[in-house]
């Protein structure tokens, strides 16, 4: 194949990020968008046409888009609670004759371990190449930092042994993210999937599979630090309606986890991950570190090479034109010239497209999505039960209390 025709399932914030990154993808075209909201699908398709990245049109159904002979692969970018159902519709279309080569799925692969495994099973059963859309491992600073740390530091003094990753911002965009039952949890499920996978990637020796390092134990804590406070719970209710009641049914807005692993020689490795919806700063902050015997690397998305200053005399409207999850419009503020590039979407989509064109499985695939789902469930169990969780425990039936709607730390704290 010379070019890949791509369709998007979903039309929201993340789909638009992917479409904007397509300017850097040379051998694929965005040809379709489906969304349960037809107007949103039309707008996302119009964005693709406006950017010149494909003659996209809005489709009436997933099945119709999958069956279009011009569409070769689908990017699954809908809400977490719709992901498995959308995958089943794609596979039903394939079973009915649709000629799809592959499916790329946004994080997390599933809200629970069984959901993630079912996504994996469906892809295998229907002969679909599978890509797991974990953009942060494709971020230029992460890829280059890992390359140099291993080529120079590890080669001279030994493999790295500690990876730290954090993702922090002031809260999600859409109502369903705040609903633990729909999203599958809170900030741990939403963002720690990024941080743990970045840690696994940094600690894996280049050229070796991710399975060359083996997770053994997980310990974690979760908390409702900001958004369960009465004034902020009321903000959420006013913004999203009665369905989001953080006084009675909150999701965690802070989470931290430590993952203990072994390398191929049985030596200990560690991942420290921190995520927050209660961070107030210039905007989304991504920070990663890798430490070895005689070296270290670090990257922070807010250490930008471009900054703007606006004085208090200027009246500015709220927006996100400087950086994602922007919290201010005056003062000295960092600017990311191309967020899609800096966050890894450009390189991620180039890789997925080239793998599908070559008939190869991407380096980030549903196996990684299943592995992350297992680690996230172990982290939730650890936080709920206040103990270290071993990875040989059965997590197949485990559903976090946050996802069940049963978690309320404020109520538990009352005598």
Image (tube, rainbow, N blue to C red):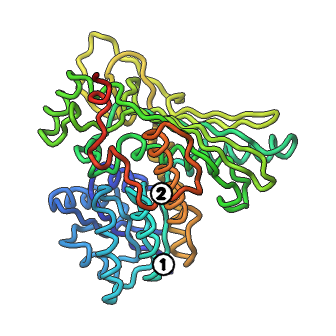
Name the residue: 33% across, 76% down: 90
Q: Which residue lies furthest to the bottom in this view?
A: 97
- Which of 192/145 is in front? 192
Query: Which quadrant would residue 95 be assigned to in this image?
Result: bottom left
Q: Distance between the residues labelled 2 and 1?
A: 22 Å
- For image coordinates 78% across by 34% down, the residue present is 295
Is disc 1 surrounded by few (<14), some (14 to 19) or many (20+) residues within 10 Å? few
The residue depicted at 25 percent of the width and 47 percent of the height is 176
Q: Going by the picture, which residue comes out furthest to the front?
A: 415
Q: Reply above or below: 324 against 396.
A: above
Front-lying residue, 345 or 190 = 190
Residue 299 lies, in percent from the top left, at 60, 34
Q: Which of the 4 image quadrants contains residue 268? A: top right
* Circle nearer the viewer, 2 or 1: 2
- The answer to whether residue 48 is left or right of residue 360 is left
From the top left corner, tell me how far across and down residue 294 is, in percent.
82, 33
Mark 2 crowd level (few <14, some 14–19, many ≥20, 10 Å Cα) = some
Residue 39 at x, y percent in the picture: 15, 58
Please, which residue is most extreme toward the right here? Answer: 156
Q: Name the residue under label 1.
A: 124
Residue at the disc numbered 2 = 395
Q: Is residue 55 visible?
A: no
Above-or-below relation of 189 to 11: above
Q: What element carries label 2?
A: loop
Which residue is the extreme one toward the top? 313
* First along the sequence among labels 2 and 1: 1
Residue 414 visible somewhere in the drawing: yes
Which image quadrant for residue 191? top left
The C terminus lies in which quarter of the figure? top left
- Label 1 SS: helix
- Tell me if residue 15 comes above or below residue 300 in the rendering: below
Looking at the picture, how far across and down is residue 157, in whole percent? 86, 40
């Amino acid at each position: 194949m010379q070019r890949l025709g791509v369709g998007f399932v979903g039309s929201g914030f993340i789909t638009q990020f992917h479409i904007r990154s397509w300017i850097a993808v040379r051998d694929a075209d965005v040809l379709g968008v489906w969304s349960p909201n037809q107007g949103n699908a039309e707008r996302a398709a119009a964005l693709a046409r406006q950017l010149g990245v494909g003659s996209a049109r809005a489709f009436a159904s997933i099945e119709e888009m999958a069956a279009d002979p011009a569409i070769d692969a689908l990017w699954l970018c809908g809400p977490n609670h719709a992901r498995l159902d959308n995958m089943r519709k794609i596979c039903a279309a394939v079973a009915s004759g649709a000629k799809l080569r592959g499916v790329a799925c946004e994080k997390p692969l599933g809200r629970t371990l069984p959901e993630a495994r079912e996504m994996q099973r469906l892809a295998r059963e229907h002969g679909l190449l599978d890509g797991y859309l974990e953009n942060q491992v494709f971020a230029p600073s992460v890829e280059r930092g890992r390359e140099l740390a291993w080529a120079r530091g590890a080669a001279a003094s030994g493999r790295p042994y500690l990876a730290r990753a954090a993702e922090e911002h002031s809260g999600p965009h859409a109502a369903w993210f705040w609903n633990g039952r729909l999203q599958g949890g809170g900030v741990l499920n939403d963002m720690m999937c990024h941080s743990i996978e970045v840690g696994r990637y940094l600690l894996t020796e280049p050229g070796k599979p991710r399975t060359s390092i083996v997770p053994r134990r997980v310990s974690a804590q979760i908390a409702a630090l900001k958004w369960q406070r009465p004034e902020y719970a009321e903000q959420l209710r006013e913004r999203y309606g009665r369905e989001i009641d953080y006084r009675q049914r909150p999701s965690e807005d802070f989470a931290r986890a430590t993952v203990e692993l072994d390398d191929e020689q049985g030596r200990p490795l560690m991942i420290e991950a921190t995520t927050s919806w209660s961070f107030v700063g210039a905007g989304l902050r991504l920070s990663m570190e890798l430490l070895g015997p005689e070296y270290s690397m670090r990257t922070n998305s807010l250490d930008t090479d471009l900054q703007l200053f606006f004085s208090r005399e200027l009246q500015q409207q709220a927006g996100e034109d400087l950086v994602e999850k922007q919290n201010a419009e005056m003062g000295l503020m960092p600017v990311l010239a191309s967020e899609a590039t800096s966050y890894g979407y450009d390189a991620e989509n180039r890789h997925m497209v080239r793998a599908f064109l070559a008939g190869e499985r991407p380096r980030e695939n549903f196996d990684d999505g299943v592995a992350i789902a297992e680690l996230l469930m172990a982290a939730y169990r650890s936080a709920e039960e206040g103990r270290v969780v071993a990875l040989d425990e059965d997590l197949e039936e485990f559903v976090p209390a946050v996802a069940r709607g049963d978690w309320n730390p404020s109520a538990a704290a009352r005598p």
